Image: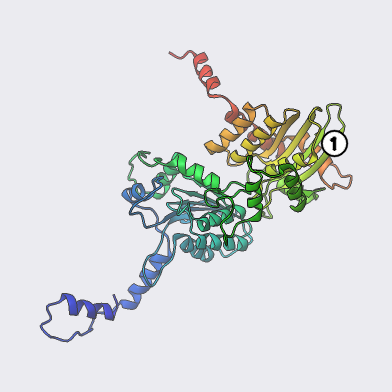
Amino acid sequence: MSCDDFEYCWDNFVDHKGMCFQRRNLLKDYDFLAAELQEILRNPMDRIHPSTFRFHFPNLVYASGRKLCYLCFQVEGDYFSYNDSDRGVFRNKVHPWARCHAEQCFLSWFRDQYPYRDECYNVTWFLSWSPCPTCAQEVVEFLEEYRNLTLSIFTSRLYYFWDPNYQEGLCKLWDAGVQLDIMSCDDFEYCWDNFVYHKGMRFQRRNLLKDYDFLSAELQEILRPGQQRKRDWPFPPRPGAQVDPRSWVQEVTEPGINTRRHSLHLLVSFLLPRPTMNPLQEVIFCRQFGNQHRVPKPYYRRKTYLCYQLKLPEGTLIDKGCLRNKKKRHAEMCFIDKIKSLMLDTSQRVEIICYITWSPCPFCAEELVAFVKDNPHLSLRIFASRLYVHWRWKYQQGLRHLHASGIPVAVMSLPEFEDCWRNFVDHQDRSFQPWHNLDQYSKSIKRRLGKILTPLNDLRNDFRNLKLE
């Protein structure tokens, strides 16, 4: 309270009987207390109350009365060990003199705590509301400052998910390399254990996942690569509406529209840039295809590279190249576009081998299955250097879908790395030199993939075979 606040209280809440207000001794420690309060508001909370967590974090489409946003964060780095000071909770400030969203509070705090831009950081957010467009833009600018920082955002609810501006904000985050997903049961339990004053109470998922399926589908639709949501932009576009011309072309080429689909597809394929690169530099290959659990120094961000080669059954090479994920277009989708543009003879069997740095996401896995199903003359095999978000059930389902659809997914080992080196790297006749513990990392990832692809029925049969009494 300042002097004006005290005087207001004196005039309105005190039976002063006409006496004038006197500030004597009322503001003795005002400067100290104001500084302390500002410091408290600038720094994160350690944990939140269980009732706060249960009220503000459920998966709800319409969350009445939940005007506050909570951000639970965890910061990890290769140069320091994890401790309690590297995690906490921010809440948006609604004071007239200090309006600040929770995301902005974290960015300001992080810049003060971690001023070294060249270090490698892994940051995880658990949000009660997804970021607004302004915060999304500030996060993108923040990632441009910290180029070796990896950010994962798990949100409980989507804020104004029907508004194109808010959708565009989420897409900007996705394009900047941010992992976005809806909080699942495992995420809620992790937050309960690490960010809630639970006092030994066990986690209960009751009412937390009420609208999880709907929100997950909405987020996947918003982030769908290169596609505009139809219900936001009816065909044809409204006069004066700002719409991506490429997404409008996609609407035009939908089945049922009276247009020359094939000719327009060729025209669009000609106009759009081809993301093909040949060959890879040695340093790019070693950095991006490295299967280490953590990025070795010097730090860098791992991206998706896809190297492919097409051969006839007798071994004749038809085509090969290397693709990289582009804005709103994953490398797997660029690969599908490339194969379609070749206009291969459907009566001739073609074998395709893909070497990829990260295993496909659920959406790309679904698209690959549909593509191979529509082109039965193609035989596709995928070798991944690393598994992308392998601990998430949805990503595991994508790998199982590929496997069940007859598209083998395997982990790259020394022979695959050597073959990729020979065919896609500008090695200047130098032989491939394996990095430290390559075989050990490969075997570890293979075991992980084997557990993901093991059917539940096989596990049940294994338990029955134990014949436990």
Q: State the residue in front, 336 or 293.
A: 336
Coordinates of residue 427 in the picture (x, y in percent): 85, 46
Residue drawn 46% across the image and 39% down it: 213
Residue drawn 53% across the image and 18% down it: 462
Outermost residue toward the right in this view: 429
Coordinates of residue 425 in the picture (x, y in percent): 82, 45
Image quarter of residue 447 = top right
Coordinates of residue 365 in the picture (x, y in percent): 63, 36
Disc 1 target residue: 318
Please identify the quadrant where the C terminus is shown: top left
Residue 106 visible, this orientation:
yes
Outermost residue toward the front in this view: 258
User: Could you tell me the amino acid type at mark 1?
Assistant: Ile
57 to the left or right of 385: left
Q: State the residue in front, 264 or 316.
A: 264
Q: Within 10 angstroms of label 1, few (less than 14), some, or many (20 or more) residues?
A: some
212 to the left or right of 283: left
- Secondary element type, mark 1: strand
| Count of numbered labels shown in the rendering | 1
Seen in the picture, residue 162 relative to 26 is either above or below; the reply is: above
